[in-house]
Amino acid sequence: MKVKLLTYTPHPIKAVFTAARSCYSASVPTQIWNEDEPKERMHSLIDKVIAAGHQSVLEHISLTFSIEGISRSCSHQLVRHRIASFSQQSQRHVRVEEGEWVVPPSIEANPSAEGIFQAALGQIYVAYRELIDLGVHPEDARYLLPNATKTNLVMTMNLRELYTVSGVRLCARAQWEIRQVFEAIREELVKVDDLRGFASHLQPICSHLGYCPEQKSCGLFPVKGSPSLSEEGEPSP
Amino acid sequence: MKVKLLTYTPHPIKAVFTAARSCYSASVPTQIWNEDEPKERMHSLIDKVIAAGHQSVLEHISLTFSIEGISRSCSHQLVRHRIASFSQQSQRHVRVEEGEWVVPPSIEANPSAEGIFQAALGQIYVAYRELIDLGVHPEDARYLLPNATKTNLVMTMNLRELYTVSGVRLCARAQWEIRQVFEAIREELVKVDDLRGFASHLQPICSHLGYCPEQKSCGLFPVKGSPSLSEEGEPSP
Amino acid sequence: MKVKLLTYTPHPIKAVFTAARSCYSASVPTQIWNEDEPKERMHSLIDKVIAAGHQSVLEHISLTFSIEGISRSCSHQLVRHRIASFSQQSQRHVRVEEGEWVVPPSIEANPSAEGIFQAALGQIYVAYRELIDLGVHPEDARYLLPNATKTNLVMTMNLRELYTVSGVRLCARAQWEIRQVFEAIREELVKVDDLRGFASHLQPICSHLGYCPEQKSCGLFPVKGSPSLSEEGEPSP
Amino acid sequence: MKVKLLTYTPHPIKAVFTAARSCYSASVPTQIWNEDEPKERMHSLIDKVIAAGHQSVLEHISLTFSIEGISRSCSHQLVRHRIASFSQQSQRHVRVEEGEWVVPPSIEANPSAEGIFQAALGQIYVAYRELIDLGVHPEDARYLLPNATKTNLVMTMNLRELYTVSGVRLCARAQWEIRQVFEAIREELVKVDDLRGFASHLQPICSHLGYCPEQKSCGLFPVKGSPSLSEEGEPSP
């Protein structure tokens, strides 16, 4: 899997700050935009606004990622997020080549399982090619292709939705592959000076809530109402 | 494949009529709702409003379908529609049983192809079961499962989005399986007295536009600007 | 102000239950729909699912309200919610009549203020009529009309979004008028047997979180991390 | 009114091209992104894709505008567009100052009307200030403020939605003020080399359809099915 931030809204701190200030200011947005406020002061206001749950100002920041070499299981989960834009490689039009498979770590770690997995993939690929050689259109031959088949997407998501989705997809209950996608997305943000301050908010939902909303916790935060929540106001990790 | 309309907004004609009239009337919506307007007159106003492209009033009608036994190829396409709600059977939690496959008609019609297809599916299923017997979690074993694997969804979509999506998915360029889903949806609407009048608007986009927007037409309507468009004001099918 | 539930998805408990069960069941949705599960058992599963934060199943329930006699200040706030459908009375096409104003309680309670308010409204109305008599089109004459002017909307919202929006609009920081709208919406749900169980979840966001996300609390719940949060696991109201 | 493009997705031609090519290519998006394709060739592919109605690739381009000094009538219309992000100056928190009004051209052109309009605005403003001096909170005093009151917004919209919304708001049936907003938006795009090629697609919907969908045309294009549509394949303006 490879995740790469292709492009994003320039001056993201200034853009969010301008949007936030415009709501409460007599000044017009172009004035606020042109003020020479230091980044630290802008980010400090932004952090307060977000902490208070007023995240809509984050929607002005758009981020476009290349997500390459994920399985079709993972892409099927990914495109369920509706406040985002996806352009995905089409199995109807692009033929799949041998060896383009994602292997789950639990299978890779188990030699017997991996043997079965790889042998079956080999058989599938032979049959897929035979169907195409018989004149079956790729869009129908692909009915044989496994979930493990690799796919690529261009994904654009705004920063508010990235917060929300990360809350769900960085949770230990999410499947390992989509969790890796959002960990890689967070690493991409960390690499950019003007996005690093936002990246720290990309966290599983428990770390926003201060408790685990599920019935059973992974251990990071206790479930709501459990005794360990009561000890020090802020639950321990 | 089985498509069944489970439930829908009651009094759909009255609901759309009330919404449409409320925009241009001094009367409050409850007054309009309680008027005893005959259905034909209400539908006649609705048809004019829709013909003029003011489709937002259709959003007040919500329809919930059970869509059963479609392939994961088809469900991956279906859930790309973002103005809709889906609850889909999870391959992470539900084990797949033997024989739960969708066979494309082009393969069914070709005995050699079908032989290859069915043999490969048999091998996949054996390997899937072996992985599970080895203790691999179903959410990882499923990486072997083919696109042909059947899945079920509950889908809720409003009537405006159903018009828009049908425009794309009833087009001859859509894949056969998702086209069947939307043909079956249209048939479900035809069965209900109060929805029949809306069902006739579920058509490929060319029949709304009067021309084919693609570079090459399926023959139903000529492409935009072609000579056959000019003969009689309204293009022939 | 008058709020009236015009229509809603029939069998809402069964619809949400079917959607929730379908995700984890080998049974197809029509089977689950046709099972004769008692409502209490269905609601008990639904409550668990919602408590765990998996609210997407609530999207299958659509509710259509008539909202009558609210101010244009309030409607301007209301239509900011984007996962909803609105058909609003048009000031471009419908002339406003005298006396169609909303008076804020803080003004009503203050005789000097109310005198000023009513006198100004009278002057505005006279000027509005004079403009129309001079041939100014209502869509331009209305530039004089105040925020207090009454308007009507038909609003359709799904139950998940109604939860989310109620979290914000039932908060003490929301303006009194839109808070009244969502209190009236909740009362409408309480009147319907099959919706009453859902109505109890329409609460300000603090009662979901267990703390106030704002910098200063109204007193209902303490702000996050404050000492009173630590005493008994669950904060006191 | 002042409209200013504050920021937008950098490399918009390359971003749309990469998204479009990725769907039909075996290459991964980062490869396509790094190819040194000339802009003219990229734009030529994009234009074909858009002409065929496949506009989703345009969603990867996000544009953020400052919209200053429009009336609250206009902002109420503007925020009805749901696939967009708005941060609007709050009348609850920012006091309105004298003279911050939008005057419709039809009133400005008519001295008697303008006299009535300005006099009424003066009376409103005096009453508004008196209410505030009496201790009425600005959020309630503003119930007196007219639709003409100026407001500012930061608006982010993706390029696909900008096409769709321009189709409606550049139509002669849209009100003059919001039409001016979208004309100004188009002019902002024309000023930027990499956006100019997209700006030409911001047109009233009739110019996309080749006919007027309304019952009565403004004259730009004939209504659907009218004789003048039939003469030369492509209707004359």
Image (spheres, coloured by chain):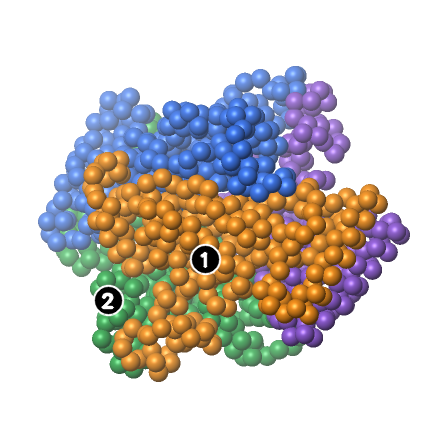
Chain colours: A green, B blue, C orange, D purple
Q: Tell me where residue A83 appears, x and y as whole percent.
A: 46, 53
Image marks 1 and 2: residues in contact by CB distance under 8 Å: no
Residue type, mark 2 in image: Ser
**Quick one: A94 or B213, which is closer to the camera?**
B213
- x%, y% of residue D218? 74, 34
Q: Name the residue under label 1.
A: C183
Amino acid type of the residue tagged 1 in the rendering: Glu
User: Residue at point 24% right, 26% down?
Assistant: B114
List the single residue furthest toward the right: D111
- Quarter of the rendering occupied by the N terminus of chain D: bottom right
Question: Does residue D56 lie above or below B163 as drawn?
Answer: below
Q: In this view, does A1 lie to the left or right of B220?
A: left
Q: Which mark is residue B181?
A: none
Q: What's the residue at 86%, 56% (across, down)?
A: D115
**Can you identify the residue that label 2 sits on?**
A217
Q: Quadrant of residue D26?
A: top left
State whether residue A66 is above or below residue C33: below
In this view of the protein, which residue sits in the foreground, C69 or A72? C69
The foreground one among D35 and A13 is: A13
